Image (cartoon, helix red, strand yellow):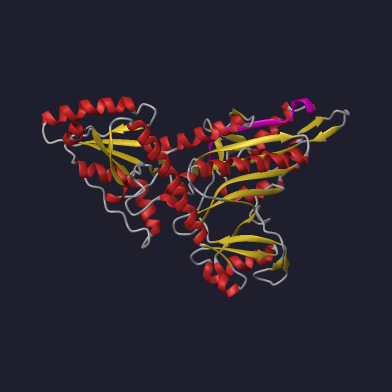
Amino acid sequence: MAKDQLPSRSENFAEWYNRLVLQSELADYAPVRGCMVVRPYGWTLWENITAALDSRFKATGHVNAAFPLLIPKSFLEREREHVEGFSPELAIVTIGGGEVLEEPLVVRPTSETIIGHMYAKWIKSYRDLPVLINVWNSVVRWELRTKLFLRTTEFYWQEGHTAHATPKEAEEETLRMLDVYADFAENEAAVPVIKGKKSESEKFAGALHSYSIEAMMGDTRALQAATSHNLGDNFSRAFEIRYLDQDNNLQYCWTTSWGLSTRFVGAIIMVHGDDQGLILPPRLAPYQVVIVPIFKDEAQRSQVMEQIEAIQRQLGDFRVKLDDREGITPGFKFNDWELRGVPVRIEIGPKDVEKGTVALARRDRPGKAGKQIVSQENLAAAVAHLLDDVQNSIFERAKKFMDENTHRVDDYEDFKEVVKSGWAEVWWCCDADCEAAIKEETKATSRCIPLDQDGGSGVCIHCGEKADQRAIFARAY
């Protein structure tokens, strides 16, 4: 059964995205408004993302734990900025077991408060620090406008929560985890990012300051792909997270939190995909290789399938899918796996069996340009080389696209034109009123103040006051 033709990305990027998520069977709409069902293909992609991140977290000394889904409402009210920031998005349970609850319970929008409560119980001495915990869970935020993976009422993520003895250690942790996210994005997902500090208006509710990695999607809009927050001692004071230092003085801890969610699946789709469908980075793809047998009759089938068994043994170190569906043409299978973004396709028919060859087709270069005939001898080495080349190629293509659509401008009229279809890197005074005016006039928001600055100074793109930092402004998801 043929899939519906996808809309062109250039003509209707939003509809292309929505249809692709559904047709590639990554996710589907749930019966609860704003929620999604992540289908097995999408969940396997998420599992590969979590594995790549989890190994990085553990290599930096973090351990996993689990905390409750339900949080006493009074906990959120202890940190004023935090509750103000999340109040419009809260889902609150007021009835349990058929009776009105004595205290309403908030369905977890994030875990700083419940974790702060527990850290106050666990941390007593400087010997207990640092505490380096990560949590894999789902959270609920009652979003008004939802989009599969990018913004859903319930979404899956990890949230790291750490406690430290000094502000210096907390800041080092915040930036260390930002680097971990950037390393994952670029080296596993092949998504180029800019690391930077968020403005006061854009920072996490209750944070001292926030950092993010920002990625450019295929329509040039920005996506906040992950965040890392230095919470200062705000939550420690709210929850009395204190420790006795080496001089026996009682001190407040300094805490951090950081997270990356299933919206990163959306980033992979929008950065790499084309009019034929997904293009998945080999290091994260659910299947790295799909094998499509080609035959006309049972005799040829037996011959081809016997050779495929030998090929599968060769490719034991890769994630391989054999498409042996009956009653479906090879051409349909080619299109189906292109839609699903499998990085490498192996085609093998009777002539290939005779010659000891296979056809390798790479997803990032559809058609003849991406196809080659190779020997079945040392096929594993050829596939490994091709997967590496696809991984590097899609990163370089995305990086080139981001560079070509990021412009340094000094004139506000030029700025207004640039942010219609790209990113503007500009001198900015960091004033909140100036930021609000830019958003009102252009629909562009400050994405981040890049950590990598050239130095020097200039004048703010909007108000003309002195500015000593450049910032990225763009329309965003």
User: Residue 164, image x and y in percent?
Assistant: 74, 35
Q: Quadrant of residue 11?
A: bottom left
Residue 162 in the image, given as x and y percentages of width and height: 68, 35
Determine the residue positioned at 65% across, 40% down: 176
Answer above or below: position of 191 versus 440: above
Residue 391: quadrant of the picture: top left
Taking the magenta stretch, the answer to whether it contains residue 132 is yes
Q: Residue at x 31, y 24 (%)?
A: 313
Tell me what residue is drawn at x 50 percent, y 61 percent: 404
Q: Is residue 108 magenta?
A: no
Segment colored magenta: 126-139
Q: Is 207 left, or right, of 425 in this rendering?
A: right
- Residue nearest the viewer, comparing 142 with 407: 407
Q: Quick one: 302 or 333, which is closer to the camera?
A: 302
Query: Residue 85: percent from the left, percent from the top?
Result: 64, 50
The image shows residue 470, relative to residue 34, as above or below, that is below
- Taking the spot 13% from the left edge, 31% from the top edge, the residue there is 300
Q: For this rendering, which residue is in front, 127 or 115? A: 127
Q: Does residue 367 show up? A: no
Q: Main secondary structure of the magenta part?
A: strand
Left or right: residue 299 compared with residue 439: left
The residue nearer to you, when weighing 368 against 236, is: 368
Give the x, y percent position of residue 274: 36, 53
Q: Quadrant of the N terminus?
A: top left
Q: How many marks?
A: 0
Whether residue 421 can be seen here:
yes
